[in-house]
Amino acid sequence: MFAQLFFFFFAAVAIASGIGLIVSRNPVFGALWLVLNLFCVAALYITMNARFLGVIQILVYAGAIMVLFLFVIMLLNLAALPKLQSVNRKLVVAFLLGMAVLAQLTYVLAGSLDLLPEPTMPDAASGSASALGQELLTRYALPLEITGILLLVATIGAVLLARRKFE
Amino acid sequence: MELTLSWYLSLSAVLFTIGTLGVLLRRNAIVVFMSIELMLNAVNITLVAFSRSMGDVAGQMLVFFVMAVAAAEAAVGLAIVIALFRKKETVDLSRFNLFRF
């Protein structure tokens, strides 16, 4: 019973904060809504027994990536966009496209409900740091190394792109 | 009422749609970026839900790598936004028409 209550509470807050992200005119508020959303997703990971990912979600997403976003928003000193005066055709088309995505996802989900795997009871250690670390350093050692190279390349690229004299 | 896989998949679909709407509707480049992060998170929920349902940690490993790639993407993307802001003094996406012919 508690699991259901947890799920519905965090799911509702996650959806509400996602909507808050796309309707807030000031990007700083949008970033704060997204932080709330990321915390809810972390809580959902923990309800799914993926505790290590929940902690990593808060540390990496809410802690590092969102701080970077807020830093850039404040560095650029963006003013809030002016209030939308009229609903033009572009917005209607964009909204319809978004609804089409939702309809497709719902259609696929509704059509495959009986194909979904039976939920198995996971053992308590399946989402722990030691279980994931063991996999990470044995079966997924090569992807881990490639990820390290990717992060190095991204760091160098970010420094080069944001340098003052770009030419 | 049982808390099954389909609940998590439905939540993921809704969050993904909200992210899509954010990318399509907003003109602020940074808000578009944050909407992309929202979509990545929606997919991550799907992966963790399947991982739990099938009793396999492969899904959780994939989420780990998605987070690493998202961090790299955010760093490079925000650097591009800063470079664009230097050039045009705005992050309004409708003002960037370098590729228009």
Image (tube, helix red, strand yellow):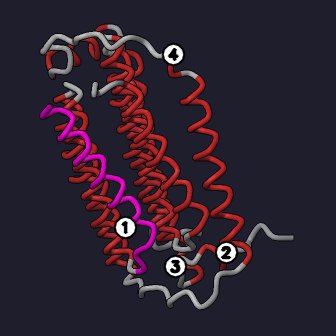
- In the figure, residue A86 lies in which quadrant? bottom right
Query: Mark 3 and mark 1 in contact (Cβ < 8 Å)?
Result: no
The answer to whether residue A89 is above or below residue B38 is below
Does residue A144 appear anywhere in the picture?
Answer: no
User: Is residue B76 toward the left or the right of residue A106 in the image?
Assistant: left
Q: CA distance from mark 2 to mark 3?
A: 13 Å
Q: Nearer the viewer, mark 4 or mark 3?
A: 4
- Tell which subunit mark 1 falls on: A
Query: How crowded is the residue under tag 1: few (<14 C-alpha within 10 Å), some, or many (20+)?
Result: some
Judged left or right of residue B95, residue A163 is left
Give, as a three-letter code, the residue at label 1. Answer: Gly
Asked if both marks, 4 and 2, belong to the same chain, the answer given is no
Q: Amino acid at mark 4?
A: Asp
Q: Which tag is nearer the camera, tag 1 or tag 4?
A: 4
The Cα–Cα distance between marks 1 and 3, rounded to whole angstroms, is 29 Å
Amino acid of disc 2: Phe
User: Do pointers 1 and 3 mark residues of a single chain?
Assistant: no
- Helix, strand or loop for disc 4: helix
In the rendered image, residue B7, in percent from the top left (x then y), is placed at 37, 33
- In the rendering, at what x and y percent does residue B5 appear? 37, 25
Secondary structure beneath disc 3? Answer: helix
Q: Residue at x 61, y 73 (%)?
A: B93
Estimate how packed mark 2 is, as few (under 14), some (14 to 19) or many (20 or more) residues with alpha carbons within 10 Å: few
A153 and A40: which one is in front?
A: A40
* Foreground of the two, A4 or B1: B1
- Numbered mark located on residue A114 in the image: 4
Mark 2 or 3: the one toward you: 2
Residue A137 position within the rendered picture, expressed as x and y whole percent measured from the top left: 27, 14
Pointer 2 residue:
B96
Give the magenta part as a residue range: A1-25
User: Which residue bears the numbered disc 1?
Assistant: A20
Q: Nearer the viewer, mark 1 or mark 3?
A: 1
